[in-house]
Image (tube, coloured by chain):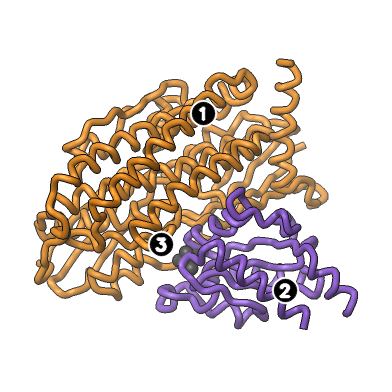
Amino acid sequence: MKKIIPIGPYHPLQEEPEFFKLYVEEEKVVDIEIEIGYNHRGIEQISTLKHYDQIPFVVERICGICSTSHPFAYVNAVEDLAGIDVPVRAKYIRSIIGELERLHSHFLWLGLAGHFIGYNTIWMWSWKHRENVCDILEVISGNRQHYAMFKVGGVRRDIPNDLVPQIEKMCDGLLSVIDMFRGAIMDDPVIHARLKGVGVLTKEDAIKYCVVGPTARASGIDIDVRRDDPYAAYGEVEFNVPVLYNGDVFDKAVVRILEMYESIKIIKQCLEKLKKEPEGNIETKIDFIPPGEGIGRHEAPRGEVFHYIRSDGSNRPIRHKIRAPSYMNIASNKVAAVGQTIADAAITLAAVDPCYCCTERATVVDLKTNQEILCWDDLVKLSQQKTEKIRKLYE
Amino acid sequence: MGLIKKSLLKSLWVFHLPLSPCNNCDIEILDALTPRYDLERFGIQLVGSIRHADVLLVTGVPNYKNYTKLKYLYEQAPKPCFVVAIGTCACGRGVFKDSFNSPCDVDKIVPVSAYVPGCPPKPEAIIDGIVKLIKSLKT
Ligand code: SF4
């Protein structure tokens, strides 16, 4: 008997609220349909009503988790259009904020992934340690999220030099935490059994679906905008791009954990160099934006974001196009989730790191009677029970 | 009503409805439940179905695809059900007021009992809002 499981419909990133319809036969997922549009707020249109200095605040509100990625790509686009050079100190600050955001975003993902497979301790712990990153961001910018740090030509606030030791200390503290999570995930036979070979996205499919970010890097595609097309301070620091080859949920988790080490490495190098720059020189004055078009890219925690700006010489853009990473990544679920069991669906859909808070409602509908059989909570429970079963095998 | 109100003072069960938020308000709501703030020790708990909830936490701006759903959900909730608007978006739509896809404010669709402004409000602010709601129930 074929059943439909609707998952969704809300999803918070602009242009990509998601509504998954899983078609299941007994335990197996046979097809998946993706519907988007529940979260459309018309940001591209609002953006053409604001002037260039206001737009960072608008695009920041596209997504809360990667609330620096969009302003980052946007300022890159406008600076590309107008040929603006940014002071060195501002470049370092930009990279630091970008990496702090990656840290908190990956902690957030790790926690939710832990929750979906029944490791609620991982959830609580990673959210607990995520607070440290939020604290630092609050000290720097005055807000825990939506930092409002970016402006065309520089940054809005300086990171004073006497704040550097505090940030370094937080980074050092996080290293042992990440070590712990790495141990908890890589050395646990239960997690191996639970996540390895689940939701596999092969390299061919990954290329076909144009996935980006950690989702692509877990499938063996070695792309990273920070390294391939350096912007801000990424050209001046050394870091590796972790790439794994199996494309399953396990690799997606490990890639993210390894990336956190790299983020800390980048932050520390930037802080070192930041100390040597004179304080206060954080922005270039801009008189006007010439007509023309520009593109900007940034490697967000979930992959590449892309902004396109066209200007007619006035103080507002006449077109602002945004492409966010989950837009491609979510579509890859079509191959990753098909053929899986329902118990694996939750973690597979979650593995591409869409912003889940909004996918927390799902129901299994029996096509014949149209009755709801499972809700999202049950789905998570199913997933947790499977882990429990595997754990018993190992005892 | 006396008995119901009295029972509501102890442990509020909340249902979280994101309309079209940017996700930050939702994260801060979850944040309030995780170790640092740990609202769960007061019996405040996120529930999976509106039919179990005493409080509806609304985040984000309504849009044409989802604003009817807010009304349905509110109608399904056992009364009394208190609606708390979390974040500037839910309180007054903020920057999205000019959007072509935002029909009206949340409080035009359902009655709102408490507003927690901020973009996003800190978990402390959310807790403060809930405390004020409980206090207003007492009087
Ligand atoms: S109020 Fe701010 S943080 Fe909350 S959903 Fe709206 S834009 Fe996001």
Assign a secondary structure to mark 1: helix
The purple-coloured chain is labelled: B
Q: Which residue is mark 1?
A: A180
Give whichever of B74, A273 is nearer the camera.
A273
Give whichever of A253, A146 is nearer the camera.
A146
Q: Chain of mark 2?
A: B
Give whichever of A209, A133 is nearer the camera.
A133
The residue under the point 26% across, 61% down is A157
Assign a secondary structure to mark 2: helix
Give the quarter of the figure containing the N terminus of chain A. Answer: top right
Residue B56 on image: x %, y %: 68, 67
Assign a secondary structure to mark 3: loop
Q: Which residue is mark 3?
A: A143
Contact, CB < 8 Å: mark 1 with mark 2?
no
Q: Looking at the picture, which amino acid does disc 1 mark?
A: Met
- Chain A as rendered: colour: orange
Crowding at mark 2 (Cα within 10 Å: few <14, some 14-19, many 20+): some
- Tell me if residue A29 can be seen: no
Give the quarter of the figure containing the C terminus of chain A. Answer: top right
Q: Which disc, if any, is residue B43? A: none
**Mark found first going from the N terminus, 1 or 3:** 3
Q: Which residue is mark 2?
A: B134
Q: Looking at the picture, which amino acid does disc 2 mark?
A: Ile
The Cα atoms of the two marked residues, 3 and 2, are separated by: 27 Å
